[in-house]
Structures are given as structure tokens and as C-alpha cells.
Image: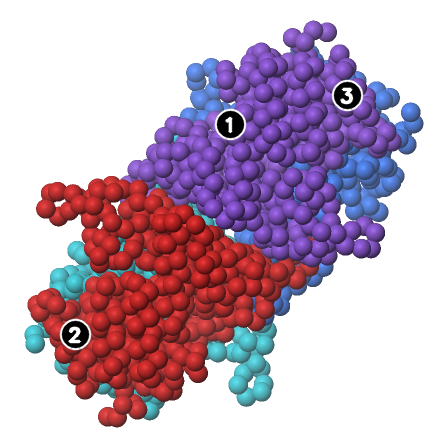
Chain colours: A blue, B red, C purple, D cyan
């Protein structure tokens, strides 16, 4: 079977993201008409027993315990990087240099320098390189982007974005790699803030030009596995103001201490002609205020984004039958395979976004936020 | 000062409805431009001390302890009947025969026979006679009626109406006059069901043609004041199906046992072109689905009914500043005074609705519901 | 390979339900720890080319074009019936007699007689027979059932259930098999009404004892494929009142004409101690009013049913990451496989519900509704 | 009648705030049991004809055209200042020096210097001086303050506050005094931002310690009445980050350009034990997440703040009967009269808040915001 027909996939990482990506690779060809078939060739993890079990459980045909071996395989054309951020650069750059397509989880890297190297490698490679800002494929957010691009809210004046979780409220919650700067790079900023920065760029097409930020660590010591405690070396929350190209302004907030908010990625855009608002805890819905409607009937319309005319929906169930979190990964897989089939690089084919350049742009904003929080000044981009 | 300029008001009853009506009479001339001024001449109650205190508290210039004396006063042109249902007919008919305008709280009467006599008296009197279906003056419901009349939802196919309260959930709640058939006529049916029947007629312009009903009394004995218990002789809940003129069908429910629902008057109309939905617990809002909108942007629009263009709103606060329950009484007062100034009977002047004939029509539906519940058959109207 | 380790599945039907069931069979073993593995042995359809394509697309290892051949296969232990209702009885009974486990889509049959024969066959067979009332496996509804069973709302007094869709609002929508009595048995009643009847029995544990109903066909002629029109011979809507065991009463409504409501299965239960309410258009949420809370803090709590402690959720994503419509099918598959592994019949193992007896019970209620609508009288059960 | 029994009121200003205050003075004694009676002695405006008409319309016994004459009247004990901010200091200080009680609309002044002089005058006068942060008397916000004070959400970590309006979205909207710095002091900052700063202090009891801000004017020229245009010299929006005493952090936003948001004062407090959230567009509701509830039943509870046990509610209607915007003014009037009767200064009697010192504290925060926006640095308080 030729590579025209199939794309062999090798995935690195078997945790939460690995499970979500696997579900997407198993499902995408069963639901969408694809130009190429995905083949789940191999999964890679460090622990052999666990990786073997994961391969069996998640539906991969084989496994590797060395990511370099995975990349070297001829039957792998696409490397899917689902590891923590500190290994993204090394794996992704090696894969690109080996001529592979790459899907890399967000944030693209832990530092701007790494992200720059990755973006450079992607430009040189000429294969498809995608940053896994998966929420771009939530149908309601994809519809929101379409509506902004179509001028339905006019020029954006205000962005109001927050990503609210609460899993660190309890001081007894343990110290994991996500709370250690050497592995995670940052805390809420990189994990959650990256999403709202990317969503803003994606939805509005605008660039961040300056930020003023504060970060805070509310609980500075947490229990380790061994009965002791260790220092939390990342931010618990990051708040920032921003100016964007075109004169828009915005407030941004990422936190893991918003008691009761489980996965509250919220973004509202106020424009000269209307407003659009989204909340990931109601991911099948989009709120739209059309400022051009007659005043007596104007208001916020709750669009249930489950119609065949909505992005990705014609492949799924009848109207009113909801999709869930994992569907966005399936949609991402579909767009990525479509881009690979088209032989497209990002500049030519919209489906391949977010590009590594997009990932780099987000990293630069996160870096400016960290810098501003450290200095207490506005940081320009 | 001539009657052209002022309308002297005499109110019978000083309890909950008396307080709400008084607030309206005090306020209406301060907020609306009126063709005539209301004058709060006298309030009437049986207990002199309590009535005197109520007059002072509620802002009435004088008081009476005999409603016949109130009606006889030359300085009273409008009699406002806020007593329990068993005295409505006698007072209202006497007032009409004395040439007074009458506002009578709902339900118009406890029986169809009484309501017929009242409607006949109103037709003979030629003065303005209004049944106090106050919710017609909630701006969102008035807007809903306007939108239905303007064809915004096309022909109505479904009515889905419920009035849900929960103040009888506790079996230890005492036996009051509202739970005794000789005073209240019926229970949830007359108290709450009357509202959804009237709202349906008002909003759709359709008539009930047949009903199938059940009523139930969940708690049949309740404590009396004297340490004993007494029998509950009214319905705790009334449920019915209905066919309406024009082919529409509906479900209706009135209950005082919907735990957690405090004042949940909800009505939804599904038409050939759209849907409108209302909930009294969010009385400043109206939900509208416009079936003619492009599919990609269709949905339920939450209209915040606080714009100057909305019914009654130009007299109040800026957009987004909410009104409450009592404002509907002020709006009712305004419409009633306007009708009186116009010398209008109901057939000529829209503001005078609900007429006594409307009150009678509701009473006939309630009677058909009670009859159907007793017989276990469909009752036609 | 022994039946201890694997269950070979043969599915009849390749349309909407076939796709949903296939997604479940592909996914269940990847997400849940199962006592047996499902094997997607064969799919069956009448048209060979289309069935072959469906097998390839949906992930089935082989296909059949005669359901009798499918049942006869030794490698099939479970027959999954996803055909229209008029063929359920014949296929399911044949499968049961052949010693197979059976999952049969709802409604169990088009008539009570068929359902009785099916339930009898299931009792005789001793294999696992499940009716596909899939919504029982929506986590929020499963939680609701648990909470009712645990007494969180006390004794149920009111059931308020509706299943609202709008795909027939347009009179130009074509005449399909779903609108012809000979194939579909009934219209909204069997398609949508069956769900709210089953949900009521499942959630409350109560039985319907009497119903009063009306049915209506709003659009009696619809275009056929050949340029002409044909008669709609099923109900467009069915409304009924019900009395249930234990003294509860309820309103029920099924319609395909609720403009703007796409998949609005709503059910609210008012009990002596609290209220629970659900809407399928927000299927990850459950509303709970706890009547025992202090009055100052009481209200409706929106439970986001995505915690690991909630039914089925520990197998999925972190809190706040939503599930969709199709997940209920995966949960159903998990419970069915668990029951098969246990060698359980329905009386012993809760996971095997809804049994064919449950399916029959629903059919009897639907029959009583149709009978009441025809006669205009209350029908007792 | 002695001053023990009555408080004579003189109000300066007859526009929007004058109307709202008048409604409160007319109503408060009819609804609440008061220790003293309010007497609406005189209203004051510059234009005699319009002031005379306003007196008649709004229910004042007489009028003045010079506020000094109003203050000088022996029958006026309380001066109610409803003028634009640039005249607050002069009038309020004169009234205090004349031994009057003062209610002054917010913001207390246009500058910190003025506010300091006013607060000093209030301390010297010994009469009751209240800043009109009326939203403190919205029952849901009063309940929220009580719940925070009672520890229901533990220690506050996040404040998320916005006041969103949209009445300046249209560039053709005219240039009024509110858009001119010499009269209004500032734009959205003083008008809307003052409310969320005060609400934060009131609800949490915390002080602002540092802010980083940006302000923006989106439309810099607007039409004047005479056919020309003039410069907008105030901010259209103000955004700021803040650190508060006790380690809390927050985002704050005030804007008149949030298309579709009419009066969206929203404030959410995330604490170590729970979360409370409020939106003025649903002012009868309060959202509460109790982090100590069992995980399976946890969620946001929508408290309908209409129970007799809730602040101010026992004087009004039965549960579920909503209040509106203007009721908060009536509640403010009740608390002010209660404080006057008690001979209380703010330190002794909670009802007299917000004090002039509270008004000054808000002014200092607004000043720090403006300073930070001008300098591009964090400003400490």
C-alpha cells in the first residue's frame, strides 16, 4: 500500500493526551471521508511493560521504548508528540529532520528559544507540522472564527478570556511534574494561558502587541510522594492585560484555583457590530449578539452548534445530539490528514493550522507575560 | 377638580393584593404620563383598627369598614376589589350598578354562574370593568403577545404551560382559607391555573375547545390554628390537556408541590415559524427562536426586555435596569386609567383588557377542567 | 478462543443506529476494563454493496445480507438489532431461540403482542436480552436514578416529561418510513414518547397505572420521492396525563413540531424532599434542588456530571471535560458485556437493564396512550 | 412633629438619579417599619419651570432653585445630592457644615482631593454621611457579603469583576457631559469602575494595594448638538489588574463598548472553600459553589434571593416574586433613615455604610488606576 493511501502514525507518550489522541486516530476514519487512511503503527513510552499494555489497550499495532527508534521506522510518516513540554523540541526537531510530519502537543515548547528552533525546523522540513491547539476544532469555536472572519461582529474592541480550573484549591494536593518549573516550564500560564492566547489569535486574527501581567503562587509547598514536601516552582495563576493589533484591548486570566470551575475556558469578543461568547463547559453552544438586529428582538442567541451546516458536524449525529471533549481531537486528526494528503505546508492550506509558527507566537506572548510579571512593567511584543 | 382630571379610587381588601395594588396606585402617576390622576380616596376592611393602620401605611386618605359605604361615596369612581374570590361577585356587581368602574382581582369568581352575572353587569354598566390578570402587563409577556400577533411565530401548534410553586410541600403547613373550597373555590386550579389559562388566551388569541384533566390532593389533612387538624377540600394540583381553536394542542399544569419552584409560571408557544418562551422567575427575559433565521445562526435569543421600545419601558430606567413583580400592577393601573379617560368599553379600547368577559372565559375553562377531573372524560367548551 | 474471553457481535442494520452502535463497539474495550472483549464479527444489511462498504467504514470484520445467516454463525454470540421496529420481533426471537444474547433497539416492538412474544422468548432463552433505551446510560440520568433511589428527593409527586424535536415543522419535509404506520408503528409516540416513558420508569421505579391522551397529525400529506404526495399515517405529537403507582401524577409530551427544540428530552421529578431536572440538550448537567438545605442557601444546583465519582466517568477524561451523545452507547455496551460475562439474567444483574420486560412495559404504556387518544377516555394499565 | 419622628429631605438634582431616589423616598415608609418617617420637603434644580414640574411629578412638597437655599431650610435635615460629580464636594461639604445628614451619589467626587475634603467634613460634622453605592442594597449582593463574612467561601483568592455596558458602541451617539472630563472627571472608570471597586471592598472586606491599568478611548470625536463634533476627553474603557490585602488578586474591567451587554455588573469571588458569583442583569439570583459539599452533588447553586430570610425581603412579596433595580434605592433609604434615627456614625452602625471614607477609598483606587494607565507602571496604594 502506498503512502498516497495511508499515513503511518507513531505516537510518543501514553498518558492523558496519548489516550485522547488514540481515540481520535481510531475514530477519524470511521466517521469522516478521508483522502488518506491513518494507520496506528506504533506507540512509544519509556517503560516497556506499561507501553506494551498501552499499545494493546489503545489500539496501536506495535510499540517502541525509544522515540529515536520510532522516528527511524519506515512505516511511520507522522510523529505525534504527546510528552511533557520539556521534550517537545528534541523529539519534534528530530522527526522533522527525518522527513516526518509532526503533530506536537501544546504548548509548543517551554522556552521561546526552543520554539524558534522548532519553527525553523518546520519551515526547512517542508512536511506538515501542526501544534496541537485542539480547541480550534471544537465546532463552536470553529464557527466563532468563521463568524468573526465574515464580519459578523465587525472590528474587535474587547477580548475577555479566562481559563478557570480548580484542581489545586486543596493545599494537600500533591507536588507533580506540572508544578515543577524544570519539567513544565510554567504553571497555569503555559498549561491554560497558552489556550486562551492561541484562541484569541485564532478567533480574531489579531496579534498581541503589549502585555502587563502578574503571576502568583498561592500554595508554595506541597506534599511529595515520600512523606515530605517540596517547593512549587511554577505559577498557580497568571493574569494579564493586553493590547492587540487593530486597537483591541483585553483581560486574560489562567488559574487552577477557581473553586467550582472545572474546565472553564471562556472567551468573549465584543466588536463594533456584535458579540460572540463561548464557554468550554458548554462546548456545544455559542452565544451571539447581532448588533444589527431590530432593537426589540435583539439579545444573545444560544446557537446549539450541532447542525449539519456547522463545522465538522455533517459527519456526526442529527441536530441536537451533542459532541464531547474528545471530538475536537478527531477533527484535528481529520484536518491534519487532509493537509498531509494535499502535500500542503501551512501557508497554503488552512487545515494545517495551528502551525509551528503559531505555536511560536503563543510562546512569545507567554514569555512576555512572564517577563512583565517579573519586572512589573508592560512588555511589548 | 372635575372627574375629567382625577379618578377617585376605593380599594376593598388590605392583604397581599391590597399592598401590591396600593404600590401601583402610589407609583403610576409618578412614572407615567396619564390622562387622569389617580386619587387614593379610601381603603376598606372589616377590622377597623387594622384598616386604619393599613390606610396610613399604604397611603390611603381615609378608610371604610363596610364595602357598601365605600361604593356609595361620591369621591370614589373606581372600585378595586382585592378580596378572596367568594365575595368578588357581590361587591363588583354592586359597584357596577352604582355606576363605578371596577378592577377585580382574579379569578373573577368562584363559579361560572357568578362570573356570568358579573360579566352581564359589566356589559350593562357601560363603565370600565377589568379582571386583574396582572401578568398581561409584565413587559416580556406583553411583548410576547405583540410578537405572536405580528406573526413572528406563525400559527401556534403547541402550548406548554405550567405554574409551579412549592409552598405546600411541607405537610405541617397550616390549613388556611386558600385550602378550603367554600372560600377559595378551588386550590391550585383557580389560584395558579387561572393565570396560565388567561395567559394562553391573551398570548395566542385562541380559545380552549376541550380539556381532559386530573386533579389531586396530596395532603388531605392539615393542622388548624387550634391544635387540631382539618380537611383540605381543594386540589393541590391540576393537570390538563387541551385542544384549542385553530388546531393547537397543549399541556397545562398548576401545582403547589413543585419543590424548589417558587413562582415558576412558564409558557412556551411553538408555532409554524418560531417559538417564544417565558418564565416568571426571570420575568425580564423572553426567549425567541426565529425559525426563519439562517440555520447556522439560529437558536434561542434571550431578549432582555428592558429597552425603551419594549412595552411600558420608556417610562422606567435605562436598558438593562430590571423591573420586578410589582411593576406589572403599575402598568395595569396605567392601562386602566387610560381606558377610563377614553370612556372606553373593552370592545373599543385594547387597554381595558382583561375584560370581565375574559374573566368569564377563564372561569369556564376552569369549570371544564374541574368537571373533566371529576368525570374522567374530555369536556368540551 | 473461548466465550469466556470474547463476545462475537453481529449487528443488523447500518443506518443512524448502526453507526452509533459501531462507535460503541469500537470504543468500549479501549476505555473500560471489561471482563470480556467484544469482537466486531459481522454486520448485516440487505444491499450487498452498501453493507460491504458499511462493514469497511464502521469496522466490522465481515458482512452478511441475510440476518438468518448472521444468527447462524458460530462466531456470533450477541445479536445487535438496529433495524426499524417492524422487524424487531422476528429477528430478536430467532436470535434468542438460537441461544444468542440480544440487544434490541427501542421501541422493543410495534405492538404489545410482538413485545409479549419477545419478552417470553427472552425469559425462555436464559441469555441476556436488553432493550436499547440508551439514555439510561447518559451519566447525568444514571446519577439521577441513583439519587432518587437513595431518597434524595423523597417520594415522587410530579413527573414533568417532554421530548421535543422540530424536524417536521416544514410541511415540505418528505414522507419517509418513519411517517408510515406500517413500518414505524407510530410517530412521535413510539419514537420519542417511548424514551420518556422508559426514563420515568427507570428513574422513579414507579409504574404507569392510567393515562389520558391526545394525538395529533398537523401535516397530513407530505411529498413522496416521485413528485406526488402521500398520507402521513402516524401521529406528529402525542400528549398525555398519567397516574403512577404511589400516587404520583405526570404530564408527558412527545412532538416533532417544537420549533427550535432539536433534541429536548426533558424530565423533572418533584419529590417530597427535593427536585431533580434534566435536559438532553445539556446532557452533562443535572439540576438538583435539595429541599433539606438551609432556606437562605437553597436553590437549584447545576451538577456538572463529569467527576470520577459519577457513573461511568472514571474511565474518561478529567473533570469538566464533557461527554457527548454517543458515549451512552459505549456505556450501554460496557454494561451489556458485563452482564454477559456474569452469566446474568436481568433479575439478578442490574447492568442488564432495560430488560425485554422493561421494553414490554413501555410498549403497554404506548398502547394505552394510543387507545386513550382513540377513545377519548382514561385507559388503565 | 419632632425630628425624632420625621426626617425632612431635600434633594438636589432631578435627572435619572433624582427619579430613582424619589421613588425610594415615596416607597420606603410604605413597605418598611421605620424608626422615623421621611418627609419629601423640597427638590432643587437650576431651571425653575422644570424643577417645579419635577417636584409635582416626583412627589416633593416644594422646590428650590438654589441649593444653598435648600440647605438653609430648617425643615430639611437630610440633603440628598444627585448632581454630576463636579458639584458633589461643594454641596455636600456645605450641607455637612450646616449640620445636615448627607446622602451623596457615587462617585463621591471627581478627584481624591475633593473626596478627602468631603470625608474630613463628614468626620467633623458628626451627622450621617453616606455615599450612594446603591448596589450594596441589592439583596443578592447583601447576601453575598453576609456569606463571605460568614466564611462560606473561605479566604478570597480571585476577584473577577466587570461592569459591561454598550451604549457608546455607535460612533454617532452624541457628546454629552458624561464624555467630557471637566464635568465627569472620567468615563467608564468613574461611572462603572467605581461600582466594581466598591463592590469588591464591600463584599470581601479587603483593600486594594496595587493596580496596573490601561484605559482606551475608541471613538475620540462625537457629534455635538450643533451639527459639529467635539473631542471625547474621558476613557471609553478601563481595564486593570489588582493585588489586594490578604494575597488576593483580581481582574477588573469597565466599558461602555461591550455590545449586547446592557448593565452587566458581574463579580465572582473564588475562595479557598467556595465561590460566589453575581450578575446585575439577573439581580435576583446569586450563584454559590460550596466546596465542602460531597463531590457527587457539588455544583453551582442558583439561589433565588426572594425568601423572607434574605436581606430586605421580609418587607416585600412572597418567595419567587422578583424585585427590580429601583428596590435597592428603597433599601438604601431604609438603612440611611435607620442610621439617622440611631444617631449613628459609620463606625458604630453598619447600616450607614458606604461612608464618605468608603467613597474616598474608592476614589483613591480610581486615581491609582488613572495614574497607572498614564504611566504604564504598577501604582501602589
Can you name the residue that lies furthest to the top here?
C2
Q: Is residue D156 visible?
A: no
Q: Is residue B169 above or below residue D265?
A: above
Of residues A82 and A135, the one nearer the viewer is: A135
Quarter of image, res D38: bottom left
Q: Going 10% across and 46% down the picture, which residue do you hit?
A: B226
Q: Pinpoint the chain carrying mark 2.
A: B
| Residue placed furthest toward the bottom | B2
> Real-space Cα distance between discs 3 and 2?
85 Å
Chain on which label 1 sits: C
Q: Nearer the viewer, residue D73 or C13?
A: C13
Counting every numbered tag in the picture gives 3
Q: Secondary structure at mark 2?
A: helix
A170, above or below D205, in the image: above
Q: Which mark is residue C68?
A: 3
Residue on which disc 1 sits: C311
Residue in the image at 53% along x and 19% along y: C346
Rendered-image quadrant of the C terminus of chain B: bottom left
* Residue A321 x %, y %: 63, 41
Q: CA distance from mark 3 to mark 1?
A: 37 Å
Whether A53 is drawn above or below A171: the answer is above
Residue A7 sits in which quadrant?
top right
Callout 3 touching callout 1 (CB < 8 Å): no
Residue C355 left/right relative to D177 = right
Q: Which residue is mark 2?
A: B67
Q: Left or right of B89: which side holds D340? A: left
Same chain for the residues at labels 3 and 2, yes or no? Answer: no
State how far apart marks 1 and 2 are (Cα): 64 Å
Tell me what residue is drawn at x 44 percent, y 83 percent: B348
Q: Which one is in front in this view, the residue at disc 3 or the one at disc 2?
A: 3
Amino acid at each position: 500500500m502506498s503512502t498516497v493511501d495511508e499515513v503511518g502514525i507513531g505516537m510518543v507518550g501514553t498518558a492523558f493526551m496519548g489516550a485522547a489522541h488514540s481515540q481520535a486516530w481510531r475514530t477519524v476514519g470511521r466517521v469522516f471521508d478521508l483522502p488518506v487512511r491513518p494507520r496506528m503503527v506504533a506507540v512509544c513510552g519509556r517503560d516497556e511493560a506499561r507501553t506494551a499494555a498501552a499499545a494493546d489497550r489503545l489500539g496501536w499495532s506495535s510499540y517502541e521504548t525509544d522515540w529515536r527508534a520510532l522516528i527511524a521506522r519506515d512505516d511511520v510518516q507522522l510523529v505525534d508528540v504527546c510528552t511533557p513540554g520539556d521534550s517537545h523540541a528534541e523529539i519534534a526537531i528530530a522527526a522533522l529532520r527525518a522527513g516526518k510530519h509532526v503533530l506536537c502537543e501544546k504548548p509548543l515548547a517551554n522556552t521561546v528559544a526552543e520554539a524558534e528552533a522548532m519553527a525553523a525546523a518546520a519551515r526547512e522540513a517542508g512536511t506538515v507540522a501542526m501544534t496541537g491547539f485542539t480547541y480550534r476544532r471544537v465546532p463552536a469555536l470553529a464557527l466563532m472564527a468563521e463568524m468573526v472572519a465574515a464580519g459578523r461582529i465587525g472590528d474587535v474592541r474587547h477580548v475577555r478570556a479566562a481559563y478557570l480550573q480548580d484542581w489545586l484549591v486543596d493545599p494537600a494536593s500533591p507536588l507533580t511534574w506540572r508544578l515543577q518549573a524544570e519539567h513544565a516550564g510554567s504553571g497555569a500560564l503555559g498549561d491554560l494561558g497558552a489556550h486562551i492566547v492561541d484562541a484569541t489569535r485564532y478567533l480574531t486574527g489579531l496579534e498581541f502587541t503589549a502585555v502587563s501581567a502578574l503571576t502568583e503562587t498561592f500554595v508554595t509547598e506541597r506534599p511529595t510522594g515520600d512523606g515530605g514536601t517540596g517547593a512549587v516552582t511554577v505559577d498557580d495563576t497568571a493574569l494579564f492585560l493586553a493590547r492587540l493589533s487593530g486597537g483591541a484591548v483585553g483581560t486574560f486570566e489562567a488559574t487552577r484555583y477557581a473553586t467550582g470551575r472545572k474546565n472553564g475556558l471562556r472567551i468573549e469578543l465584543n466588536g463594533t457590530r456584535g458579540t460572540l461568547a463561548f464557554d468550554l463547559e458548554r462546548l456545544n453552544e455559542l452565544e451571539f449578539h447581532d448588533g444589527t438586529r431590530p432593537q426589540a428582538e435583539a439579545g444573545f442567541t444560544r446557537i446549539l452548534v450541532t447542525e449539519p451546516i456547522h463545522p465538522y458536524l455533517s459527519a456526526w449525529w442529527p441536530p441536537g445530539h451533542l459532541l464531547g471533549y474528545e471530538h475536537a481531537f478527531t477533527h484535528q486528526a481529520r484536518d491534519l490528514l487532509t493537509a498531509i494528503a494535499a502535500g500542503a505546508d501551512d501557508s497554503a492550506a488552512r487545515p494545517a493550522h495551528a502551525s509551528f509558527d503559531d505555536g511560536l507566537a503563543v510562546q512569545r506572548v507567554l514569555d512576555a507575560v512572564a517577563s512583565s510579571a517579573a519586572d512589573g512593567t508592560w512588555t511589548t511584543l
